[in-house]
Amino acid sequence: SDVDALKNARIELKNQIKVDYDNGTKGALDVVWDTDQYDANKPGIHSFIGTPVLVDGVTNKDDLRATFVIELEEKSVVAVENPLGITVKYGTAIDDLELPETLAVSYNDTTTGTEGVIWTSSTNNPELEGTYDFTGELVLAQDIINPDQLFALIKVTVGPKPLKIVSIQQDAVSVAFGTAFVDALPLLTKTVNTSYDNGTTGILNVLWEEGE
């Protein structure tokens, strides 16, 4: 209703108005406000006409009315909630980042909602381990403004570069001629020593397959 819309806009019309009588006294009367023309989505000046509710012994021969004027501001963003950061694999392209498509925001009328967002970063390097800041520019719905140019931030952490095996320590066992592969398998090592491209070494489990 119009009254509910006014309350949502933090505007509450008074239930009574003060009046002056022709005998020099003052009083208060209940009032009925005309809110039919009020549009909560239309910024600007809005005037409301109030008709006093007469009581016994009171007349309003001149049909006097009360007037209440408000200026409705444009709906604007006053706060933006930053989303939680994400961690991605080394080498993940910017187009493959699963960044939020909308942001939670607060408006100047005390309501909350979501708005679209475009993410950019001037420092992101998918091939360098580290944490990078992305800036989110709001993509606003119609009739919403962002006078303070608010934006969001999200941190994207690029994981370490995968190690590349450069060598594997070779091993050999001796078995009798004609030994079947399945019989020789228990004699084969379960792990191998490896060297990586960053100069470190390690141990990996190994899965043996029968050759031709």
Image (cartoon, rainbow, N blue to C red):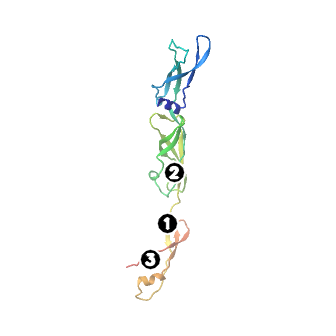
Vertical placement of residue 141 versus 181, above or below = above
Is disc 3 placed on a helix, strand or loop? loop
Query: What residue is disc 2 on?
Result: 124
Instruction: Name the amino acid, label 2.
Output: Asn
Label 3 to label 2: alpha-carbon separation: 41 Å
Marks 3, 1: nearer the viewer = 3
Label 2 to label 1: alpha-carbon separation: 23 Å
Q: Indicate which disc, 3 or 1, sits on the residue closer to the N terminus.
A: 1
Tell me, yes or no, whether the two marked residues, 3 and 1, touch with CB atoms within 8 Å.
no
The local crowd at label 3, few if under 14, some if 14 to 19, many if 20 or more residues have their Cα within 10 Å, is: few
Residue extending farthest bottom: 176
Q: Indicate which disc, 2 or 1, sits on the residue closer to the N terminus.
A: 2
Query: What residue is disc 1 on?
Result: 164
Give x and y (percent) for residue 16: 56, 23
Instruction: Name the amino acid, label 1.
Output: Lys
Residue extending farthest left: 212
Q: Nearer the viewer, residue 39 or 171?
A: 39
Give x and y (percent) for residue 171: 49, 79
Is disc 1 placed on a helix, strand or loop? loop
Question: Residue at 49% of width from left, 66% of height from top?
Answer: 164
Question: Residue at 52% of width from left, 26% of height from top?
Answer: 71
Which dot marks residue 77? none
Instruction: Name the amino acid, label 3.
Output: Trp
Which dot marks residue 208? 3
Q: Nearer the viewer, residue 71 or 28?
A: 28
